Image: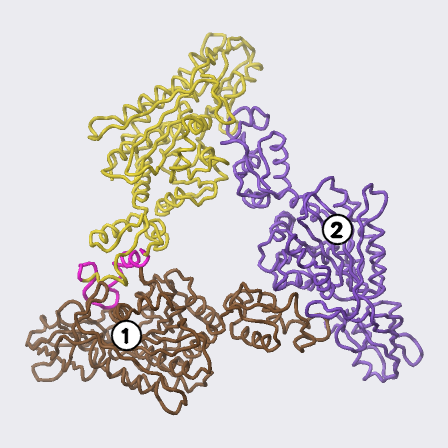
Chain colours: A brown, B yellow, C purple
Amino acid sequence: MNNNTSGKRMYEFSSRIFPYLRSITGQGVRDTLKDIEEYISQPEQGYNPPKLNICEIPTGTKVFDWTVPREWIIREAYIENEKKEHIIDIKDHNLHVLGYSLPVDEWVDLEELKKHVYVEEKQPEVIPYVTSYYKDRFGFCMSKDMLDSLPEGKYHMYVDSELIDGHLTYADVIIPGDTDREIMFSTYFCHPSMANNECSGLALAAELIRFVAEMPSKRFTYRFVFVPETIGSITYLATENHVDYLKKHLEAGFVLSCVGDNRDYSIVRSKYGDTLADRALLSVLKYKDHYTNYSFRERGSDERQYNSAGVDLPVVCFCRSKFGEYPEYHTSADNLDLISEEGYQGSFDAMSELIRALEYNRHYNMKVMCEPQLGKRGLYPDISRKGSYDAIMTQRDVISYADGRNDLIDLSEIINVPADEIIDVIDKLIDADLIEALD
Amino acid sequence: MNNNTSGKRMYEFSSRIFPYLRSITGQGVRDTLKDIEEYISQPEQGYNPPKLNICEIPTGTKVFDWTVPREWIIREAYIENEKKEHIIDIKDHNLHVLGYSLPVDEWVDLEELKKHVYVEEKQPEVIPYVTSYYKDRFGFCMSKDMLDSLPEGKYHMYVDSELIDGHLTYADVIIPGDTDREIMFSTYFCHPSMANNECSGLALAAELIRFVAEMPSKRFTYRFVFVPETIGSITYLATENHVDYLKKHLEAGFVLSCVGDNRDYSIVRSKYGDTLADRALLSVLKYKDHYTNYSFRERGSDERQYNSAGVDLPVVCFCRSKFGEYPEYHTSADNLDLISEEGYQGSFDAMSELIRALEYNRHYNMKVMCEPQLGKRGLYPDISRKGSYDAIMTQRDVISYADGRNDLIDLSEIINVPADEIIDVIDKLIDADLIEALD
Amino acid sequence: MNNNTSGKRMYEFSSRIFPYLRSITGQGVRDTLKDIEEYISQPEQGYNPPKLNICEIPTGTKVFDWTVPREWIIREAYIENEKKEHIIDIKDHNLHVLGYSLPVDEWVDLEELKKHVYVEEKQPEVIPYVTSYYKDRFGFCMSKDMLDSLPEGKYHMYVDSELIDGHLTYADVIIPGDTDREIMFSTYFCHPSMANNECSGLALAAELIRFVAEMPSKRFTYRFVFVPETIGSITYLATENHVDYLKKHLEAGFVLSCVGDNRDYSIVRSKYGDTLADRALLSVLKYKDHYTNYSFRERGSDERQYNSAGVDLPVVCFCRSKFGEYPEYHTSADNLDLISEEGYQGSFDAMSELIRALEYNRHYNMKVMCEPQLGKRGLYPDISRKGSYDAIMTQRDVISYADGRNDLIDLSEIINVPADEIIDVIDKLIDADLIEALD
């Protein structure tokens, strides 16, 4: 496993992509992808850099029940007062403009201005994140404290934006393994400057691409998906036969969301909570100091689409603090102070344990009848007395339950020992030619 | 749903049939059926009045392991003292005679009299309800207080009764629906003046016949069964191929017993507790202020026969206060004061919710892949910000779980929302052509 | 059921075999088997004495992953001090020599002596039981108190032993029943003077052989297995096709271990805890004043081999205080004071209840539809009033659930009544020709 350099590298990457003004379409997304491309192709890693496939889907394309929306171009947005002072400006913080705001250029009094400004009533000091993708309107966001402090007078509402027939952009990376059975990680770009609920998923996915590419061998093919949330995953599934292909090949998928803070670990389970993705992630999180197990009813990111009726893919969501559950969520307080190298490293470690568990998740079977004679192989104490067996209980239990009925995650569940420790035992037993994988 | 007029109407009907001296056979039963027939054919309801089929099974007919007993004719029964005063008389209360008492006409002293009088030791003020259908004896019932107060002296035991080769009477009503798959309600007449444990089941069944007959459409055929308890349900099952027909066609059955008081709601589950009848009734009762969930081991009414080995029909029992669990049970205190319009209305509302849930209990499937775009249909908020989704959670959950695996009751269970609310969502989604029923 | 004479007889038998110096091979084992042979062929029992089949497997025989070890001959073992006093001597207690000790004849100082003496640090007053079957070494055991009290000086370590190419001895008894479906009891001989963890299993198995042989009829064939622990059960399974035969014919097996004390009842469940052996033993233990339910992860006796991957037989372990869980375990304190006639009788009663439950463990089916008319058969109260049914609830429940789906143990579980009481009901219903067994 990598040392803490992963956490550091991911944090630095987040800082770089944090300022881009992303939305569900547009230049912010393209700039972000360019940085990801560079990140995953660093020559010093000594592996064949995987290819980032970028796909542009035209406005108006039918994607299941939806239509790819117009592309949003945003150039300038501010409110100025009579003294020509910019009260707010997206140059200062790109949350100040309503996502997908129409253009406007109008002087109004304070009362009229207020109709177009969104604040977060219960958190007066933050700028909220607000969007209006599918209903035409213009608008601004600011802190309630600022709005309350505005004196009567005239204000200039100015947004220089355009909604054009353009494209929705998504991307993926496929790293082939020994089989075409797939593990998927999916994350999103569509939020402007938010650190945990945006940049962190991108940074972790990019780091995992490097990790997987460096794995000397892999049973599974790995797919990494970068999409704008909701409309993007719908578009991804609807295009290039992705949904049919994934329904045939996907064994487990993981949405990465809010993975950069260091407060908790979380899973949002799949629709019925019983897929390999649920089992594998739970078997990892169970051994963290703390984790929260959310049911699918508390979903919110692209696990929604992957689990939707008709799609029904085995996908869960992995978070540190879950979206919607931490106070900074969807506000300007979700910034680079909220995330940390330690938080990232914890996420990376959990995901690399998860990948290792999945790679070893096979049905094991002992090659001898009865318990093997471990003593002659140096795998057993050679003197029998009270207490001499404690140290080898895991080995003893793996041997008993490796009867062809249980995969690695079953073994971990039955024996109540982390998958990582069981893998060590399995490696020893494979070396001793005592065990075999059946699948 | 009807307003409170149902409760009022049922209460009035109970008052009318309360005084009849019913037993498992005889004139009391026939008089009761005549009143039911009238109740269900009230012209002001504006529907085709369903037909009450009355069936008379001769004494001596073999019904499985049993034989239809002789018919009991009871004309007079009293105990008089030396002053010719009637200490008790069935003219005052028809519980005073032992059910199926043989005739007697004998003067005895107090000690001998006591051998033929049944009292309820722990409730000295009530007349108990006692019967002896299958062993020939005569007898009387009175309150313990009265028996204790009797002075020494001679007493005249007088019963003018007859056990003749006659008939056992039962009846049913069949209201056809779109399919021959059946929902059954079964209740009993065999107790003389008892309000909750007799009249209430009859009144509710009669009211439900009107309700079902008035339903504009129905997937199921509805069967309402009126029998004397135990021997009657056995006779019903044993005759006219009912058992074979029901084993083929019955989807869910409900014994109605003690449904007129207003203290609790209860279910006595089926033998294994896993039938559609269990699931449907539990999904309704779960949302009442309080209910009690009895296992089949606490059975007592005709759910016994319907669930018996070899019969094995999906039948539960619905009660307010369960038989045997309330102090007035099987005594003269089970009178018209124990039941109420409110109690009846509660039962009627529960049963009409149950019927609605059963009618809608189909497997639903979304007609589009991924989540549909609800915004363009006015089914979703058009602006996205913290908290804007709470109101539509039920709709969102129905959409996710309508994947062909779940029927309405599953959905209610998974989503933890009453079936009634889910039906409203389903109706909206059907109107939007987004969902279909698979069965 | 036998009266307390069983407990007394087993206790006396233990006293007799307690002093033999048993190990996994050798004369102690053969002496023990001779006594068992005599015990089970007592002429006063009036039955055909079953045959004890003794089998000698040569040193060097391959048994799955193991090899039958050399036979250990032990003649003398002591430590003497400079005054020629025997500090310890196996004539005083046969735990004083390390099991399978090599010969030695050497004078050493105290420091060197200590390298070859095993003590139990936490129980300074007991001699521990220590063996070294598969690694060549010599050694002695004594109490820590004694070792600590030894003065500096020279000590003579003397063991006159030999490891020869001889045999491993095992034995079994087969008592045929109506079918070749088998119930197995397995116990072990390999510990020298230990009462609960050795003699008790042998005594109970021997007593059960007498009990089973005296049963007038039996559906099952009964197999009793006597082996040294671990290597013995492996050898038993590996030879004479036993493993294949048992995989075809064994319905339930019970390892008997530590069954002579009177402190608790215990089960160590099978690997998945779901076999007939688990169900049957749990249904008996559930009604004891107290019992402990250990998972397979706390296994330790021959249930290890019987449940091992590839063998996978339905075998649990029955104990009073479980091995490893009581302080006297594997020390000189596991002596004849620890076990008692009462302890033995409790074990015997449990096992005879178990055998009765297994013999009656069939799927029952009522021969009539609906509840039968029990009154006419004297199986039901002939007068109906509050409370008159309590006494016959078990009968009523058996009748309902005897629908072909449930075996005796299911019935006991569903009805929550001991199997013994249900058997009484079933016998009555069979007499009345109301019920039949389907298998």
Q: Is residue C200 left or right of residue C357?
A: right
Residue at 52% across / 75% down in the picture? A420
**Is residue C180 rendered magenta in the image?**
no
Quarter holding residue B398: bottom left
Marks 1/2 same chain: no
The residue where tag 2 is placed is: C174
Determine which residue is flagged by label 1.
Answer: A227
For the residue labelled by badge 2, is the local secondary structure a helix, a strand or a loop? strand
Counting from the top left corner in percent of width and height, residue A63 is at: 22, 67
**Dot in front, 1 or 2:** 2
Residue at 31% across, 87% down: A38
Q: Residues within 10 Å of mark 1 (few under 14, many from 20)?
A: many
Asked where in the image residue B187 lies, by quadrant, the reply is: top left
Closest to the observer: B151 or A424? A424
Question: Could you tell me the amino acid type at mark 1?
Answer: Val
**Chain ID, mark 1:** A
Q: Which residues are magenta?
A: B376-402
Expressed as whole percent of the image width and height from the top left, the position of residue A227 reads: 28, 74
The alpha-carbon separation of the residues under discs 1 and 2 comes to: 70 Å
Q: Left of C66 or right of it: where is B299? A: left
> What amino acid is at disc 2?
Ile
Residue A283 pos. (x, y %)? 47, 69
Residue A196 seen = yes
Report if the CB atoms under discs 1 and 2 are less than 8 Å apart: no
Residue nearer the viewer, B155 or B346: B346
Q: Is B309 left or right of A111, judged from the image as shown?
A: right
